[in-house]
Image: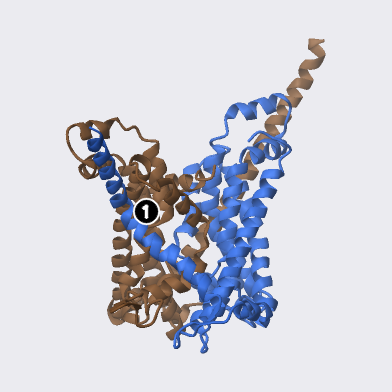
């Protein structure tokens, strides 16, 4: 019995090994193909950003021949709006990130630890608002940031309460609605709920109040989570398009994405300069991504597990 | 004694509200009031110059009779969602499954796949305009002579392809996190029962991942129904309105047209919200009901 089955078992084994290997090669080929595809647009952009303006469609497409730095020099030297756009983007993204991380941590901590009336009511509203499409509040939010919901303000007896911030064409008009965010609060709440209370309780025993405990104990121990939220926020603010497009009107106020898109409309023949500008917009986020890679991966896993 | 604990409670409540107040203020202004005002505006005629004038359902009726909405924006939006969401979900799931095989260079691939997602939508759109130009790199490589973005038959598909390309990396990472949560023992048990690779994929991986799939599809549906940046930058709704979507139409009516119609645009925004809500609920039912009682 055993003598007759052994060869066939070996055959089966060989076949599974063969198919296993084949499958692995197939998967690997697929991954490699997608990797090439993922890099290609950025690679071509980089190559052509080092070619003269006249060569924008000229082969070779694989290497910057003839090589020139002119596009970058134009962007940094001749076209003085460009450095402004970079600065505006940095300013808006950094301010939004700092405030959002702080405010989301504060609210998340309160929802996880402090008892206050209507707590679950607000938290449920927060969950619902995460499902609400942003488009529906676009027009009213624009009116609130700009001219106001009611022209001339709301009349209350002798008082006239303005219903708008008058922040059109100001970076603060972009920043204000971004300083708090439902997903960030939710993420921090989940984190603090899963976190042991002992450390804080010890601090409270020693007589520091809620605020002292929050700033001296809670914020430092949630560092990883805060960095994750900060990266998500910074990436979103840096790449944001629709809202700044509505708020910012004059070219001096533009952020980099708005500026690049506007530049294409004005100087569509200078596409090489648009490409080098695109590199400027992509590079900072790429560097941040490479440095903080594991946080990005964490943050994505976090978004995924929110329903799971 | 009692007053003391009452005061402590009051103090805690006060602290709680102080802690949530920055978020709460922003939330009340930009979500609650905004939503309420959007619904109000949808029943008015409003052009920014004169105060909103109540006209009941007139705005909704005008939307539902609008040629651009009925013939272009509505079918285009559904076409976009129906093509992009299934492809990006399936593609990213397969990529994640391949990544989970512990092949070589896994970390390297993970980094590379995420690259298109960190690039801003505007930058990637500007790059694609150039790549798909008549003399662009795509035509050079393939030897075709199609004018991709100026041809109403192709423009929308280029945008769809680009969005599948940019989102698949992120979705792949979400799936990968989900895959790594599936215990190995389940696969081993299936192997002992003689399941092959495909069977394992469809009878173990997919059912076990159902909550993650639900999340990815939901995010995809909500995002795709609101596609805007890429259309604004690449085609501005053209050529011949072949890429006009509902969100682009809302923007056009509220901010771009010479005759601004914020009331009518709000009506369309409310309609879009209702559509998204219904599709999300329907899809939840489909995904949660489709399993043959497999363990979740």
Check disc 1 and report the residue beneath it. Answer: A231
Residue B264 position (above or below residue A30):
below
Q: Residues within 10 Å of mark 1 (few under 14, many from 20)?
A: many
Q: Where is residue B63 in the image (x, y as percent from the top left)?
A: 63, 78
What residue lies at 36% left-to-right and 61% top-to-bottom?
A: B26
- Quarter holding the C terminus of chain B is top right
Colour brown belongs to chain:
A
Residue B75 on image: x %, y %: 69, 71
Residue drawn at x 70%, y 44% is: B289
Q: Which of the 4 quarters of the picture holds residue B240?
A: bottom right
Task: Place residue A214 in its image quadrant.
Answer: top left
* In front of the other: B25 or B211: B25
Q: Which colour scheme is used?
A: by chain
Judge from the rendering whether residue B255 lies leftward or rightward of residue B189; answer left or right: left
Q: Where is residue B258 in the image (x, y as percent from the top left)?
A: 51, 89
What colour is chain B? blue
The outermost residue toward the left is: A207
Left or right, B28 with reference to B261: left
Quick one: SS at disc 1? helix
Residue B261 drawn above or below residue B222: below
Residue B137 shows in this picture: no
Whether residue A198 can be seen here:
yes
- In screen coordinates, is B194 left or right of A305? right
Residue B280: % across, % down: 62, 55
């Amino acid at each position: 019995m055993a003598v007759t089955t052994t060869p066939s078992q070996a055959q089966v084994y060989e076949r599974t090994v063969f198919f296993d290997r084949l499958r692995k090669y197939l998967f690997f080929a697929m991954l490699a193909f997608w990797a090439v595809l993922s890099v290609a647009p950025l690679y071509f952009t980089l190559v052509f950003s080092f070619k003269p303006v006249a060569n924008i469609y000229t082969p070779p497409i694989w290497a910057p021949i003839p090589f020139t730095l002119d596009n970058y020099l134009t962007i940094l030297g001749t076209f003085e709006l460009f450095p402004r756009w970079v600065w505006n983007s940095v300013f808006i993204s950094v301010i939004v990130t700092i405030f959002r991380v702080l405010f989301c941590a504060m609210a998340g901590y309160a929802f996880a630890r402090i008892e206050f009336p209507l707590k679950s009511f607000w938290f449920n509203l927060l969950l619902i608002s995460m499902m609400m499409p942003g488009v529906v509040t676009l027009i009213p939010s624009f009116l609130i940031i700009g001219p106001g919901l009611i022209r001339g303000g709301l009349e209350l007896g002798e008082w006239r309460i303005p219903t708008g911030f008058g922040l059109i064409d100001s970076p603060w008009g972009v920043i204000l609605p971004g300083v708090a965010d439902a997903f960030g609060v939710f993420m921090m709440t989940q984190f603090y709920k899963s976190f042991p209370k002992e450390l804080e309780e010890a601090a409270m025993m020693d007589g520091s109040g809620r605020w002292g405990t929050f700033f001296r104990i809670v914020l430092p121990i949630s560092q990883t989570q805060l960095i994750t939220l900060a990266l998500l926020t910074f990436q979103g603010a840096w790449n944001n398009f629709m809202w700044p497009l509505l708020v910012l009107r004059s070219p001096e106020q533009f952020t980099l994405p708005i500026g690049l898109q506007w530049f294409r409309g004005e100087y569509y023949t200078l596409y090489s300069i648009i490409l080098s500008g695109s590199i400027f917009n992509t590079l900072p986020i790429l560097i941040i991504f490479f440095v903080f890679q594991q946080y990005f991966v964490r943050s994505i896993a976090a978004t995924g597990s929110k329903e799971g | 004694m009692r007053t003391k604990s009452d005061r402590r409670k009051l103090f805690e409540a006060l602290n709680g509200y102080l802690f949530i107040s920055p978020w709460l203020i922003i939330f009340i202004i930009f979500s609650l009031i905004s939503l309420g005002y959007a619904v109000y505006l949808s029943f008015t005629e409003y052009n920014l110059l004169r105060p909103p004038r109540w006209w009941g359902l007139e705005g909704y009726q005008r939307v539902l009779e609008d040629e651009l909405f009925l013939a272009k924006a509505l079918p285009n939006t559904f076409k976009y969602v129906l093509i992009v969401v299934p492809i990006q979900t399936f593609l990213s799931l397969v990529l994640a499954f391949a990544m989970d095989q512990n092949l070589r260079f896994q970390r390297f691939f993970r980094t590379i796949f995420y690259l298109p997602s960190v690039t801003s939508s505007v930058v990637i759109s500007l790059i694609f305009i150039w790549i798909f130009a008549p003399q662009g790199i795509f035509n050079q490589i393939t030897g075709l002579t199609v004018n991709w973005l100026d041809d109403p038959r192709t423009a929308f598909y280029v945008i769809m392809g680009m969005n599948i390309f940019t989102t698949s990396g992120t979705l792949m990472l979400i799936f990968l996190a989900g895959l790594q949560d599936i215990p190995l023992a389940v696969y081993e048990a299936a192997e002992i029962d003689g399941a092959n690779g495909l069977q394992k994929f469809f009878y173990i991986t997919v059912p076990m991942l159902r909550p993650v799939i639900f999340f990815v599809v939901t995010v995809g549906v909500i995002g795709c129904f609101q596609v805007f940046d890429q259309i604004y930058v690449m085609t501005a709704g053209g050529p011949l309105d072949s890429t006009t979507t509902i969100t682009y139409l809302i923007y056009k009516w509220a901010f771009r047209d010479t005759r601004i119609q914020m009331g009518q645009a709000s009506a369309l925004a409310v309609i879009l919200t209702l559509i998204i809500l219904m599709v999300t609920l329907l899809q939840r039912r489909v995904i949660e009901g489709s399993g043959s009682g497999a363990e979740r």
